[in-house]
Amino acid sequence: IITSHGKKAHLLTDLSGNPLSQIRILEAQVDIHTEGEFSLQNSLEMARASLHGVPEYGHREVLVVMSALSSCDPGDVYATIAAMRADNIRCSVVTLSAEMFVCRRLAQMTLGSYSVSAGPGAISALFSAHVAPPIVPGSTVKRRRWVYMGFPMQCSYNYPTLCQCHNRFSYEGYLCPRCKSRCCELPTQCSVCNLTLVSSPHLARSYHHLFPL
């Protein structure tokens, strides 16, 4: 999650497959101050840098939610849009105010969607439209790549143990099947051996999007 105010972009949370960690950080931002102008270019550049490490089999997508009527950018925002397109990053925009040409252009060039909220009741529907993964164009070539995954067992302890993901002590956690280190949330990546740790419901959810009923 990236926020933009004061003509700058601010990284609020890192990429994560666990929605609970994202929600906790958002709930903690009650007293955040967001004075200053919005910068679309700085936000896109930070998002592009965050998605740089996503492998070829992954999907790179940015959802811009904004209410500003202008963008204060340090350079050529259209050059940044071209770079997003070259990196195969799909950019969609949901605006809570009037339409902006540069945002419409961003969505068109990156094969994203552009939506303008008609009122408070339409916001939820606009966000829900981005829940399902988008259809990959037929011209896009995806190389097959094997992904190692671990299915850790949930364990309870009579004494507090240290988790490797947050460096906190707790009585419950998930044991990595490869290195036997403990994490407290799924899905995640083991911080010791870098194994992707998931549960069977997470895998079933991905399969459901690939082969819908």
Image: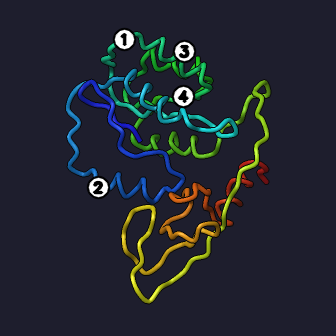
Marks 3 and 4 sit apart, C-alpha to C-alpha, by 11 Å
Which residue is located at x 27 percent, y 50 percent?
A: 29
Q: Which badge, 3 or 1, is on the more N-terminal residue?
A: 1
- Point out residue 203 in the picture as x, y percentages from the top left corner: 69, 59
Nearest to the observer: residue 141 or residue 190: 190
Residue type beneath disc 3: Ala
Q: Is residue 175 left or right of residue 120?
A: right
Tell me the element at label 4.
strand
Camera-side residue of 38 and 129: 38
- Report x, y in % for residue 140: 75, 27
Q: Which coloring applies here?
A: rainbow
Q: Sequence-wise, which precedes: disc 3 or disc 4? A: 3
| Residue at the bottom extreme of this rendering | 158
Residue to which mark 4 is pinned: 91
C-alpha span from label 2 to label 3: 35 Å
Alpha carbons under labels 2 and 4: distance apart: 27 Å
Question: Regarding mark 2 in the picture, which secondary structure is present there?
Answer: loop
Task: Give the CA distance from mark 3 to mark 1.
Answer: 13 Å
Percent of width and height locating residue 51: 53, 35
Mark earlier in primary sequence (2, 3): 2
Helix, strand, or loop for circle 3?
Answer: helix
The numbered disc on residue 82 is 3
Nearer the N terminus, badge 1 or badge 2? 2
Residue 40, by quadrant, is top left
| 158 horizontally vs 176: left or right | left
The disc labelled 4 sits on which kind of residue? Answer: Cys
Q: Dividing the image into 4 quarters, which one contains the N terminus?
A: top left
Q: Residue at x 68, y 35 (%)?
A: 56
Check whether the beta carbons of the residues at disc 1 and disc 2 lie within 8 A of each other: no
Q: Amino acid at mark 1?
A: Gly
